[in-house]
Structures are given as C-alpha cells and as structure tokens.
C-alpha cells in the first residue's frame, strides 16, 4: 500500500536483532571470563547460547594464543559482564557438552583424568622408547 507507514521502515539489521535480545540487568559491570572454548566456532556457539538467555558476551583469544596467523584456530575466552556471570554459568551447566568449558572444569576440551588408556598409543610410545634405547646402545658400541 502506497501510504502505509511500514513501507518506509528499514529492515531490522542482525545487530539490531541481537541487541534486542540482551537483558539490561545482565549487562552491568566489568567483563569476566565465563567459559573457555577450543576454537572460534565453539566460542561463537557458546555466545549464541548465552544470547538466547539475554547474556551479552565477547569472544577474545586466550592469552598466549593471540597470533593472527591462527585465524579461527586456538582457544578463546568467552567474556561476560559481572552481572551476567551467574546466568551464564547456569546456562552452560544445562548443556552437558559445554560443562567442560567452565573455568575450573575439565579445561579446554581436556580428556577426563583417569580414563582408559589407548592401547595403540601405549604400544607406539613403548616402541619409540625402545628404538631410542637401541640407537643409544649401537652408537655407544660404535664409539668404543
């Protein structure tokens, strides 16, 4: 319709749509680490999960991995405002696959301690050790 008010309204941008999801009471205070991600993609997944619950977040490279050549690889910290930290932890605890991303948890995708040992990896490690020992013995015999 030519005279309709809605004809002149610009389409809502993605940034505007994201900003509308943020709850103001969860956007107060300094940024604190809420979770750790193994890479940028996992970090963005955590960010979108937090945003669905109204928690704004920022993704930054973990200290020591701030190398532009890594591109999307390397660990990331998911930072949230202090007021949104408890909500962020509750959201992440509801997701069993993301519990290990919480600070103080199993770490950045680390394998659980005390789990079963891979027999192939054990055999390869022992074989490599024996090979090194054999080389040392052969070199020692050749020198003397």
Image (spheres, helix red, strand yellow):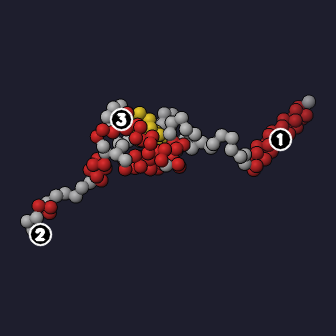
Residue 93: give x, y in percent of width and height.
49, 44
Cα gap from disc 3 to disc 2, whole angstroms = 46 Å
Q: Quadrant of residue 137?
A: top right
In the image, taking residue 38 as reference, residue 144 lies left or right, namely right
Point out which mark residue 1 bears. 2
Residue 67 seen in the figure: no
**Measured Cα–Cα span from mark 1 to mark 2:** 83 Å
Q: Which residue is labeled 3 in the image?
A: 83
Tell me, yes or no, if residue 144 can be seen here. Answer: yes
Q: Position of residue 56 (x, y in %)?
A: 35, 42
Q: Residue at x 51, y 34 (%)?
A: 64
Which residue is denoted by mark 1 in the rendering?
Answer: 130
Element at badge 3?
helix
Comes first in the chain, label 3 or label 1: 3
For residue 105, which quarter of the picture?
A: top right
- The residues tagged by marks 3 and 1 sit, at their Cα atoms, a distance apart of 56 Å
Q: Is residue 111 left or right of residue 79?
A: right
Numbered tag placed on residue 48 in the rendering? none
How crowded is the residue under tag 1: few (<14 C-alpha within 10 Å), some, or many (20+)? few
């Amino acid at each position: 319709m030519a005279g309709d008010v809605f004809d002149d309204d610009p389409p809502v941008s993605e940034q505007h749509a994201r900003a509308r999801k943020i709850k103001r009471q969860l956007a107060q205070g300094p940024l604190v680490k809420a979770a750790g991600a193994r890479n940028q993609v996992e970090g963005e997944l955590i960010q979108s999960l937090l945003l669905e619950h109204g928690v704004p977040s920022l993704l930054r490279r973990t200290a020591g991995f701030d190398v532009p050549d890594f591109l999307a690889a390397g660990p990331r910290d998911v930072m949230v405002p202090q007021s949104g930290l408890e909500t962020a932890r509750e959201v992440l605890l509801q997701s069993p696959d993301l519990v290990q991303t919480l600070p103080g948890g199993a770490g950045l995708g680390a394998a659980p301690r005390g789990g079963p040992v891979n027999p192939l990896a054990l055999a390869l490690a022992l074989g490599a050790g024996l090979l090194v020992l054999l080389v040392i013995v052969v070199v020692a015999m050749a020198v003397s």
